[in-house]
Amino acid sequence: MNTVEKLLENANELRQKANQIIPKLVKDSSKIEYAYNPLEYAWNPHSEYIRRHGGMGAKTLLVGMNPGHGMGNTGIPFGCPKMVKEILEITGLTVGSPRKTHPKRQIIGLEHPKPEVSGTRIWGTLSQIYGPRNAAASEVFIVNHCPLWMFDENGRNITPDKLTGNVSTQLTKICNQHLQKVVEILEIKRVIGVGKYAQKRIYEIFEPNQELILDGIPHPSPANPFANRNGGEDWRNAFKDALNQS
């Protein structure tokens, strides 16, 4: 089994376990009424992303927290629809819908007209450094720690750091195991957490040593004041500096 096949097998295992835990998570948590699993309904573009980017030899792993609007619609980490189509050139793939969808959080897929700032910043900067399509894949691979995009009854986003309870602990364990396997399969040398939550997780999962360097960058979200400074240029420079250290 080659690297891409191993990554696909690992992602499929996470997909199945996430599907199994969603009903328990909704029942166990007073905050969550909806939980979307893009690995399920957006498996077509997600698996295509792995095929194009997973076997190119990347030794730096970027780890996000969980899907937002981008991956929620495209199945690709930080996958702003515009970036996915224009830079990654992943187009024409069918995206389904979650089994239970909030009226305010409809899934359109790769053709969603709404941009995602975080995804635009991540993939836009990578394309500036390495070039378009899968050029960055020889250096960098991107995953999210948690595969689920979650909302309350009003459609407000609920991030994994807000979860408590036994099922949340089970979900974290599943996500940790998936991330450990990604690092093992790709023989990753450096793991960079995107934002404080992802940084916290990677330091809990891995022990930094000569074989594995752990690092972090500020989250590119417009909710982060640093990411907006100088039109985002300060964040882009911090990201480029982190990549140059790898």
Image (tube, grey):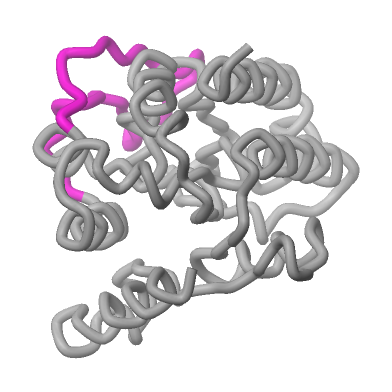
Figure check: 239 above or below 39: below
Residue 230 position in % (x across, y down) = 16, 89
Quadrant the N terminus occupies: top right
The image shows residue 165, relative to residue 229, as above or below, that is above
Looking at the image, which residue is at 78% across and 70% down?
A: 209
182 up-or-down from 11: above or below: below
Identify the image quadrant of residue 203. bottom right
Residue depicted at x 36% and y 27%? 49
Q: Is residue 207 left or right of residue 147?
A: right
Q: Which residues are magenta?
A: 89-115
Residue 95 position within the rendered picture, expressed as x and y whole percent measured from the top left: 31, 15
Query: Observer-nearest residue: 220 or 238?
Result: 238
Measured along the vertical axis of the image, is residue 241 above or below residue 155? below
Instruction: Identify which residue, 62 or 246, lies in the foreground.
Output: 246
* Residue 197 percent across, percent down from the top left: 62, 66
Q: Is 110 one of the magenta-colored residues?
A: yes
Along the horizontal axis of the image, is 227 left or right of 177? left
Magenta stretch encompasses residue 230:
no
Question: Could you tell me how many numbered marks the image carries?
Answer: 0
Could you say which quadrant of the image residue 225 lies in?
bottom left
Who's the residue at 37% across and 44% down the image?
A: 138
Dominant secondary structure, magenta: loop
Q: Residue at x 25, y 52 (%)?
A: 123
Observer-nearest residue: 89 or 119?
89
Q: Is residue 221 left or right of residue 129?
A: right
Residue lying at the far right of the rendered structure: 166
Q: Please provide percent x and percent y for residue 43.
A: 43, 16
